[in-house]
Image (tube, rainbow, N blue to C red):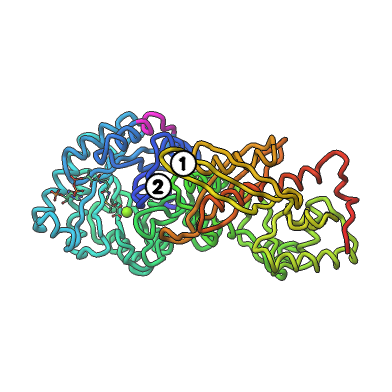
Amino acid sequence: MTDKSKVLIFDTTLRDGEQSPGATMTHDEKLEIAELLDEMGVDIIEAGFPIASIGDFEAVSEIAKRSKNAVICGLARAKMPDIDRAWEAVQHAAKPRIHTFIGTSPLHRAIPNLSMDEMAQVIHDTVTHARNLCDNVQWSPMDATRTEHDYLCRVIEIAIKAGATTINIPDTVGYTAPRESADLIKMLIERVPGADEIVFATHCHNDLGMATANSLAAVEAGARQIECTINGLGERAGNTALEEVVMAMKVRHDIMPYDTGIDTTKIMNLSRRVAQVSGFAVQFNKAIVGKNAFLHESGIHQDGVLKNVETFEIMKPADIGLNEANIAMGKHSGRAALRAKLNDLGYELGDNQLKDVFVRFKALADRKKEIYDDDLIALMSDSAANTDSDYLQVKWLRVICGSDGQEAELKMLVNGEEKSSTCGGDGPVDAVFNCVKAIYPTQAKLKLYQVHAVTEGTDAQATVSVRMEEDGRIVTGSASDTDTILASVKAYVGALNRLRVRSQKTAPDADMKSVSFKL
Ligand SMILES: CC(=O)SCCNC(=O)CCNC(=O)[C@H](O)C(C)(C)COP(=O)(O)OP(=O)(O)OC[C@H]1O[C@@H](n2cnc3c(N)ncnc32)[C@H](O)[C@@H]1OP(=O)(O)O
Ligand SMILES: CC(C)C(=O)C(=O)O
Ligand SMILES: [Mg+2]
């Protein structure tokens, strides 16, 4: 590689990322993620571990066949059948790569019970075999950061001589720290003969929360490939997060003058898609892609951002493909943000009106964790029922489940009047939703239903989110309860309340700007 400022991005979401317990993705989901990664400009996609299962083999093969620009890589142990199987899967790619590895630290050498010399021989033989099949071979000394330096230099030299074109230095257990990570790469570049003919890669895990820092330190020392995953998905505490290293090098190009080929505007979409298909929700305060990464709820921050966004934002949300509002309304918000938010929603308020609405807004914010646009629309309405969006209320629920089928009995208040219904369905949630529809007939369509366990154990709080659509209006509803069915019906009814408020406010005869409200 001649361009010394170019850092290759090697994405292993589909291999190391999928190794997260519970993150298994389906064949079609893997194809979709691979396509998105290729479109985003990832240089190498590690598509899987072909010998691991027929499913992995088929996914890697299909990804290889469909690949456009990215190199497609398959992982293999230091075993000939693994390497053959990896080659069988990736060979149809326009740019195939075999990645073979063995644990070189004392702890890992003890597992196959190989002496240093015996392992050196295995490395020579397996890398030679891989190189006879494919001219793009990556070799990894697993647990490199806990391997004796002399032995590491020795086996890397053997791998280079046997034909490896990329040498990856894994911090398999997330043990290293930034300075040590840099020193290790520097030492290898200085000591290993042939080091200047290959690319050094860094592969960090986040057990101590240092994966991003360790990867960037390795790059500063001369590594030119970062191995990473979307959302930092991966074994235990995860791998280096792709979005973090890429954005760090973009935002702080002044001190890290390295370039990647990543179209960063595609980051947010990929992050959301990976979260959905892996079932690993992104933590709210996750760097770059967390829900709160560009959100401001405190009045002082909101006022600053409204006057000059750079006061509290070091990158533009649009740079990662986020085009949503960056102001979150809550109990810490101030008048400036409330006015701006209401303006966005079509309300133009005088100072006195704003003062009054602000008092009611703070009262609502004391009761409610997050204030959504629909809450503000309801707040601006003169209908007391709308203020709390509680036209429909769940009063009582009983569900009978079993192998004979499910039946739900539901009592609700509709504008204060009690109504009840008993329905069956395809599962308990469907039975309850059928009851709601029997009580409150609606054309609204359920577009998304998601359950997340907030805590662990059988008494876990479940948070249910639903997305509903009617006449082009899309709203969400969410509710938490230790009873998943109860959380489901509350989320569903919440969304129906929102749809009702929204349809009133956007009906042809409803003029948002002239709406009156009670003082
Ligand atoms: C740090 C990493 O991320 S490494 C990658 C980890 N990923 C995975 O393991 C996911 C996919 N793995 C699998 O599906 C299975 O483990 C398989 C198919 C690879 C192997 O399954 P099995 O044959 O049942 O072996 P098992 O998983 O019990 O144990 C691993 C074996 O591989 C050997 N092994 C582990 N790493 C290597 C290596 N790099 N080179 C050679 N042999 C290795 C172990 O010594 C052990 O051998 P043994 O059975 O002779 O004692
Ligand atoms: C297979 C290797 C590269 C790995 O994932 C690790 O060591 O963490
Ligand atoms: Mg790993």
Q: Is residue 95 magenta?
A: no
Q: Secondary structure at mark 1?
A: helix
Does 159 sit left or right of 236 as displayed?
left
Residue numbers of the magenta segment: 62-68
Does 64 sit left or right of 461 as displayed?
left
Image quarter of residue 154: bottom left
Q: Earlier in the sequence, mark 2 or mark 1?
A: 2
Image quarter of residue 202: bottom left
Tell whether label 1 touches label 2 (CB within 8 Å): yes
Residue at 36% in and 64% down = 207
- Name the foreground residue: 360 vs 239: 360
Q: Secondary structure at mark 2?
A: loop
Q: Main secondary structure of the magenta part?
A: helix
Q: Which mark is on residue 37?
A: 1
Does 60 sit left or right of 277 as displayed?
left
Q: Which label sits in the foreground, 2 or 1?
A: 2
Residue 237 visible somewhere in the drawing: yes
x and y, in percent, of residue 260 in the image:
48, 49
**Vertical position of residue 373 compared to residue 209: above or below:** above
Q: Crowdedness of circle 1 by 10 Å Cα count: few (<14), some, many (20+)? A: many
**Vertical position of residue 232 compared to residue 147: above or below:** above
x and y, in percent, of residue 515 in the image:
88, 52
Identify which amino acid the numbered label 1 is placed on: Leu
Q: CA distance from mark 2 to mark 1?
A: 10 Å
- Name the foreground residue: 431 vs 200: 431
Residue at 61% in and 58% down = 315
Residue at 20% in and 55% down = 103
- Name the foreground residue: 478 vs 130: 478
- Residue designated by label 2: 13
Residue 323 visible somewhere in the drawing: no
